[in-house]
Amino acid sequence: MVTIDWANLGFAYMKTRSHIRYTWKDGAWDKGELVTDDTITMSVAAGCLHYGQECFEGLKVFRQKDGRVVAFRPQANAERMQRTAVKTVMPPIPTEMFLDALKRVVKDNLDYVPPYGTGCAMYVRPLLIGTGPQIGVAPAHEYTFLMMVMPMGDYYKGGIRPVRAIVFDDYDRAAPLGMGDVKVGGNYAASLYAHEKAHSMGYPVELYLDAKTHTNVEEFATSNFLGFKPDGTFVTVKSPSVLPSVTNLSLQQLAADLGHRVEVRTVPYEELKEFAEIGACGTAVVVTPVCEIHRNGEVIEIGSKDTCGPNLLRLHDAVQDIQFGRAPDTHGWCYPIA
């Protein structure tokens, strides 16, 4: 039995009992094994080190009110990882293999699935990397797929509370976090400079605009953009550079279920002044309200600086109620594990 201070748990790496690891070689995946050592050995010429042949996913596992342990929409993560693998010329992970890996590693680490009522969850990080040696621009000939797990609390300390964001017009990230329909691990490195600069100035997150004109909203550094207009319309961004967040897709459906009009479209930066509520959404943060957006000395204020807006809070609670088993899972999003 593990001892964890659930009340003070944040979002950070924690060594657990095991992770699960598979190797692709000679055209096929092996059957995978649970590994207790949290290190990995690879060639100094590994394709992931030299040519960025890697991708990752992120999803959560919950202990529900009735004691069941479920994952939230893992099939969607498996499908997105398959699309990314095709774009980065790596062997896709079959959905059944992805789900088998998830079940095996979670069951081996059940002590690390937070108890119901703590508000915490288990974070799951699938990772696919080119580990075979490759000098010369070409795909590797050997790959490793692993899935690691760890308990997590709030991404931002203090729970669901409004944060400030900043736009840097003097910094262009080298690559988008999402390549339309994929999620490439190495691309986060291109945002780290701006992310650290924002943190040093007291902003938890930065907002990116389109790289060509700097006039349209793309996404927050770690999360998709969403907002509500004064008439209750739910708005999120349509862009070839924006990652299709599983959380955002879920919130769009829940907003429609709650009677909101849903718009997925181009969002001009100047339109932000018209929003009643703005939030960042993703697997780790779920929903984080944004109360101010700073850009070149101009400040756009949105809603309250102290509390989450009613529509964002309703969506946050709606998805969490499904994840923790407090509301019917009418869309079949919860995948049973134990």
Image (spheres, rainbow, N blue to C red):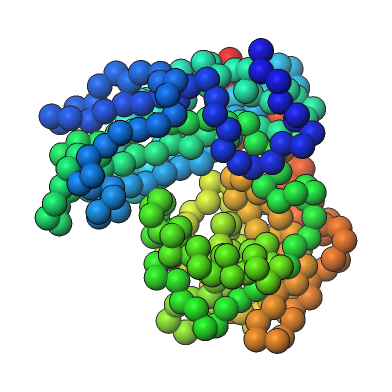
| Residue 48 drawn at (x, y percent) | 28, 48
Residue 216 to residue 188: above or below:
below
Which residue is found at the position 79% from the left and 75% from the top? 301
How many marks the image carries: the answer is 0
Considering the image in quadrants, where does the N terminus appear? top right
Which residue is found at the position 48% from the left and 37% from the top? 125
Which residue is found at the position 45% from the left and 71% from the top? 173
> Do we see residue 258 in this rendering?
no
Q: Quadrant of residue 260?
A: bottom right
> Do we see residue 109 in this rendering?
yes
Considering the image in quadrants, where does the C terminus appear? top right
| Residue 176 drawn at (x, y percent) | 43, 65
Looking at the image, residue 104 sits to the left or right of residue 110; the answer is left
Which residue is found at the position 75% from the left and 30% from the top? 6
Front in this rendered view, residue 285 or 130: 130
Residue 54 to residue 9: above or below:
below
Front in this rendered view, residue 90 or 94: 90
Residue 327 to residue 253: above or below:
above
> Which residue occupies the extreme top position in the image?
1
| Residue 294 drawn at (x, y percent) | 69, 78
Front in this rendered view, residue 186 or 315: 186
| Residue 266 drawn at (x, y percent) | 53, 73
